[in-house]
Structure formats: C-alpha cells, structure tokens
C-alpha cells in the first residue's frame, strides 16, 4: 500500500508533470504527498558565492560582498519556499494531504535521504530528457534517485510536443511514465 508519496519539485515543466501525476495518485490512494525541493549551491539559479581578488581585498569590501550574497541567498530560499507552498496549496485544493520539506544539498542524495527519513513508499520525479554529454556534465537527478532510492521510483518523462490524434496521444502518454520498483 502506498501511504506516503514523495515528489521532487523545481521550476521545470517535467516537475509540474511529476507533481500532477503524484497528486492524482495520492488522491486516488488517499495517500500523503510530500513535496521536496533541495537547495543546491550548484544550481545555476542559485547565487554564486563571491570571490574577491587578493589585490583588491579590504574588510569593508568583503563585508559588503558577503551581505549582498546573503541577501541573494535569502531571496533564493524564499523563492523555493514559495514554490513549495504554492504546490502544497494546489495539492490541498485537489483534496490531498500535503507537506513540504526544503533540505540543503545535491538534489539526488537529498531527496533519497528525505524519502528514507520520512519512510516514503514512492518517489515521483520528473525527467528533463537530458542524455549523452549533457547528462554527464549536468548530472541526472532521476537517474541518481532510481539507483539509490530506499523505495519504489516513478520517473515521469517529457511528453512529445508533436503528438496528434487521440490514439497517438494516448500511446505517447502511456510511454511517458517509467516505474522502477
């Protein structure tokens, strides 16, 4: 029985599809939905830690740069928290009990750790469709989770943009979800 379904949340379209799938499943099974977004300092959207060249170093400049970085980081965390709260509200509007968690760290390991800690029965994660060099360079959160999760994993793949006709669309939708148990 699936009592706790964890879904990885970010700003991507793949994440929105994963959220929709997870919330539908949670509603159908009367399961709790756990929304997780990992705060990753290596995320391209996160503020970059400033560096001051040694020749230009001053304590005053260092203080100003650090304060600016801290303000940017606070805004980054606030945006992530707002995203989770927005998705939690959507889930609750759909009749699903939902909570959210905002851990620090690389997404794959952080999501697996939360799933283990909260005893999730299923992790639902979106796939951005990266492959080859892009996957090697940028990593694949869904791939990491499939290989390290403490529970079953459902990877929601991107839908094709060129699907036309009901039969073709239905076939595409059937291929859009891969489950690893």
Image (spheres, rainbow, N blue to C red):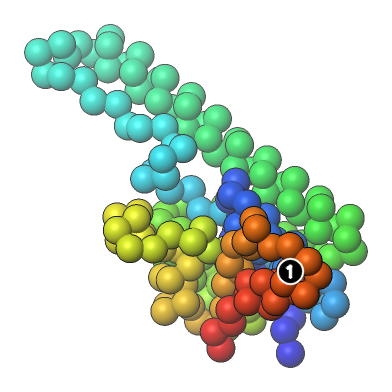
Q: Count all numbered tags in the image, as a single digit.
A: 1
Q: Position of residue 123 (x, y in %)?
A: 60, 73
Q: Looking at the rendering, in which quadrant would you find the N terminus?
A: bottom right
Query: Which residue has dot 1 on it?
Result: 169
Quarter-wise, where is residue 143 in the image? bottom left
Residue nearest the observer in this picture, 15 or 174: 174
**Residue 17 in sight in this render:** yes
Residue nearest the observer in this picture, 124 or 47: 124
Residue nearest the observer in this picture, 129 or 69: 129
Q: Position of residue 114 (x, y in %)?
A: 54, 67
Q: Secondary structure at mark 1?
A: helix
Relative height, residue 147 to residue 130 (above, below): below
Relative height, residue 115 to residue 18 (above, below): below
| Residue occupying image coordinates x 42% and y 79% | 147
**Residue 118 in sight in this render:** no
Quarter-wise, where is residue 54 in the image? top left
| Residue occupying image coordinates x 44% and y 27% | 70
| Residue occupying image coordinates x 67% and y 44% | 83
Q: Looking at the rendering, in which quadrant would you find the C terminus?
A: bottom right
| Residue occupying image coordinates x 59% and y 49% | 12
Extreme-front residue of the structure: 165
Extreme-left residue of the structure: 55
Q: Position of residue 105 (x, y in %)?
A: 42, 54
Relative height, residue 69 to residue 128 (above, below): above
């Amino acid at each position: 029985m699936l009592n706790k379904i964890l879904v990885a949340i970010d700003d991507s379209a793949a994440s929105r599809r994963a959220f929709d799938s997870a919330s539908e499943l949670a509603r159908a099974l009367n399961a709790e939905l756990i929304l997780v977004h990992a705060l990753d300092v290596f995320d391209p959207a996160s503020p970059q830690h400033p560096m001051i060249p040694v020749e230009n170093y001053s304590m005053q400049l260092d203080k100003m740069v650090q304060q600016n970085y801290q303000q940017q980081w606070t805004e980054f965390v606030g945006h992530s928290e707002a995203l989770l709260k927005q998705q939690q509200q959507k889930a609750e509007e759909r009749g699903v009990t939902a909570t959210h968690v905002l851990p620090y760290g690389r997404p794959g390991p952080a999501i697996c750790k939360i799933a283990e800690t909260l005893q999730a029965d299923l992790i639902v994660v979106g796939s951005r469709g990266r492959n080859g060099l892009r996957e090697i360079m940028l990593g694949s959160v869904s791939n990491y989770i499939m290989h390290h999760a403490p529970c079953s994993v459902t990877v929601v793949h991107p839908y094709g943009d060129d699907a036309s006709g009901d039969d073709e669309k239905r076939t595409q939708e059937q291929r859009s979800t891969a489950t690893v148990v």
